[in-house]
Every structure is written in structure tokens, then in C-alpha cells.
């Protein structure tokens, strides 16, 4: 099963809130979903979610060691979520810039190290800066990424403890396959943070 560690740890609401999506244009021409986040599955056909989404959290369970990156998007123009009767969602966001935090540990460890504060205290090991993110694909009714799904993140920032500059990248690519019981293959699932030379 390709279930990501963060998808197992967080509810569908948290995951959806993590997809930073909001309506943009021509909502009057699109059937709107009723309810909150995540939107209730439409009774027939499809509907589009209007509520704004603000950020995305990734963990890379295949990474060594496990890492996380969080990005909060300000400009949500042309982003959308489409809900299907079976509870699945399709999310779309063109390339967008936002505030980024990368840490060399999981989101749960980030919270344990001080992230429960409001605003959270970012641990010294983490990098803060800016990044761009592009994402398109499906999420199933359990809150897991589904096939096909693709996202790409690239950013730069400074480590909190010593101001060392880092470049941060993240790639997630899931593709349909007949070779796995899940019907989905993880082609890419990685977060990298490299100090500038």
C-alpha cells in the first residue's frame, strides 16, 4: 500500500486543509459542494469546493531519515477541488509561491519540539524560507493520495539555528499500474534539503 505516513497520521480534514486550494473563476458555472471540509460527496455528478485551503504538509516515509516540508500559499487563483460521488477528490493548483518550512524529521516530531505553540516555534534544525509548489491529482475517500498524482516543490531558506542557506526540493509521483494490488505505483516520493556550497 502506498499510504504515506502523514496520511495515516492525519484525518482527511487535515489532509485536505493541507492542499491549499481555493476557488477562482466562474464558480457560477460549476456545481458547488455543500458542507465544510472535506466537502460532502455530491449525490449525483460532481461538485467543486469553494472553501479556501491554506497549506500543504508532506512527509517522505521512504526518505532516510524521514523528513517533512510545509508550505503556505498566499495566491490561490485558479486552484480548485472537484468532489466525486464516491468521496474521491481531484485537486489542482498551478505553480504557486508560499512560505516554506523544512525539517529533518516528521510532522509529529515537529509538534513535539515546540510546534504546538501559536504561532509554532520552529526548531533550530529546520529551514524556513520560500518555495513554489505545483500539484495535480486524486485523493481517495480515506484521505490518501491516489493515482494519478503529481507534485513538485522547490525552495530556498535559512536554517533557524545557524542561518546556513539550503535548497529544498520535493517530488511526489503516483501512477496507475496493473502490477500492484492497490493499482498504484510510487514512482517518486522524496524530499531533499542541500546546503548551498
Image: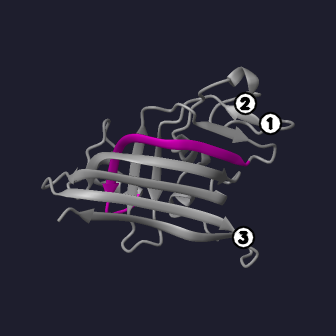
Q: Residue at x 70, y 39 (%)?
A: 82
Q: Are marks 2 and 1 in contact (CB under 8 Å)?
A: yes
The residue at which mark 3 appears reads as: 182
Q: Residue at x 77, y 28 (%)?
A: 31
Q: Residue at x 16, y 57 (%)?
A: 164
* Residue 160 or residue 76, whichever sits in front: 76
Q: Reply above or below: 142 against 183.
A: above
Q: Position of residue 127 (x, y in %)?
A: 26, 53
**Neighbour class for label 2 at 10 Å: few (<14), some, many (≥20)?**
many
Cα distance in 3D space between marks 3 and 2: 28 Å
Q: Earlier in the sequence, mark 1 or mark 3?
A: 1
The residue at which mark 2 appears reads as: 33
> Mark 1 falls on what kind of element?
loop
Left or right, residue 126 beside residue 134: left
* Residue 142 or residue 26, whichever sits in front: 26
Residue 102 on the magenta segment:
yes
Left or right, residue 115 beside residue 86: left
The residue at which mark 1 appears reads as: 42
Q: Reply above or below: 2 against 162.
A: below
Check the image and name the residue furthest to the left.
162
Q: Residue at x 77, y 43 (%)?
A: 84
Q: Which residues are magenta?
A: 88-106
Amino acid at each position: 500500500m502506498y499510504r504515506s505516513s502523514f496520511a495515516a497520521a492525519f484525518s482527511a480534514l487535515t489532509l485536505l486543509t493541507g492542499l491549499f486550494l481555493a476557488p477562482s473563476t466562474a464558480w457560477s458555472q460549476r456545481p458547488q459542494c455543500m458542507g465544510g471540509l472535506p466537502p460532502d460527496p455530491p449525490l449525483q455528478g460532481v461538485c467543486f469546493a469553494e472553501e479556501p485551503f491554506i497549506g500543504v504538509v508532506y512527509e517522505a516515509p521512504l526518505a532516510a531519515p524521514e523528513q517533512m516540508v510545509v508550505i503556505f500559499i498566499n495566491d490561490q487563483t485558479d486552484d480548485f477541488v472537484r468532489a466525486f460521488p464516491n468521496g474521491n477528490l481531484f485537486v489542482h493548483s498551478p505553480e504557486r509561491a508560499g512560505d516554506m518550512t523544512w525539517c529533518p524529521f516528521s510532522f509529529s516530531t515537529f509538534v513535539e519540539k515546540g510546534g504546538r505553540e501559536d504561532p509554532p516555534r520552529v526548531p533550530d534544525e529546520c529551514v524556513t524560507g520560500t518555495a513554489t509548489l505545483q500539484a495535480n491529482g486524486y485523493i481517495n475517500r480515506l484521505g490518501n493520495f491516489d493515482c494519478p498524482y503529481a507534485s513538485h516543490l522547490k525552495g530556498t531558506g535559512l536554517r533557524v539555528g545557524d542561518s546556513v542557506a539550503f535548497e529544498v526540493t520535493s517530488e511526489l509521483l503516483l501512477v496507475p499500474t496493473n502490477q500492484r494490488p492497490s493499482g498504484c505505483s510510487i514512482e517518486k516520493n522524496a524530499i531533499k534539503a542541500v546546503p548551498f556550497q
